[in-house]
Amino acid sequence: MSIDMFIEPGQDPRAEPPGQGSELATLTGFLNYYRQTLELKCAGLDAAALAARSVAPSKMSLLGLVRHLSDVERNWFRRFMAGQDAQDRFSSSEDIDGDWDGARADPAVVDEAWRAWREEVAFAEQFVAAAPGLDLPGRREDRWRGVLTLRWVLTHMVEEYARHIGHADLIRERIDGAVGQ
């Protein structure tokens, strides 16, 4: 039996990206849409379902995605763009897959992951709102690409979320058959 996730028109909690708007409004609109989609994919699941792995040998789970995207947000906005000395919340040099490995069926772990993700999203949104423009260079250089701008980081974040939302689609369908959105 398949549970349909499609939401009635007018009931979708996500804000559609603008069809006409500035480059900044378009980039942040798509990024916010995908952030909201991550929350929607995880909605209504308990800690065990959120921590359920996709398929062996993958370590990927919805909870792991929340933890991973928290660290991704932190890396690009706090560390790279703002120049802060901010270590990953869930991964480390001792456990480079800590975001995935630590995704356990424990309500406290779930709460911590969502709290961290929301804090990092809030920081990113405040940083972008205060930025003088999309040509703002990061305060640190990327080791492979050199100096990158806020425009590049926002575009990369849209790509990062879009790719992982595809993973979330498959994981959610495996958990309870829910598809859509």
Image (cartoon, rainbow, N blue to C red):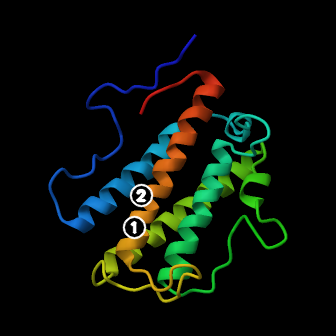
Q: Which residue is drawn at 43% across and 71% down?
A: 153
Above or below residue 81? Residue 107 is above
Q: In which quarter of the image is residue 180?
A: top left
Question: The disc labelled 2 sits on which kind of residue?
Answer: Val
Taking 90 as reference, is 128 above or below it? Answer: below
Q: Residue at x 46, y 86 (%)?
A: 147
Residue contact at pointers 1 and 2, CB within 8 angstroms: yes
- The relative height of residue 10 versus residue 108 in the rendered view (above or below) is above
Q: Quadrant of the C terminus?
A: top left
Residue 21 left/right relative to 90:
left
Which quadrant of the figure has residue 127?
bottom left
Left or right of 20 on screen, residue 147: right
Q: Position of residue 9 (x, y in %)?
A: 27, 28
Q: Is mark 1 on a helix, strand or loop?
A: helix
How many discs mark residues in the rendered view?
Answer: 2
Q: Decide which of 116, 175 is in the foreground and name it.
A: 175
Q: Would you name the residue on which mark 2 appears?
A: 158
Label at residue 154: 1
Q: Residue at x 43, y 81 (%)?
A: 148
Residue furthest left in the image: 20
* Residue situated in front as seen by the camera: 35 or 139: 139
Q: Quadrant of the N terminus?
A: top right
Label 2 SS: helix
Image coordinates of residue 102 in percent, x first then y, are: 78, 54
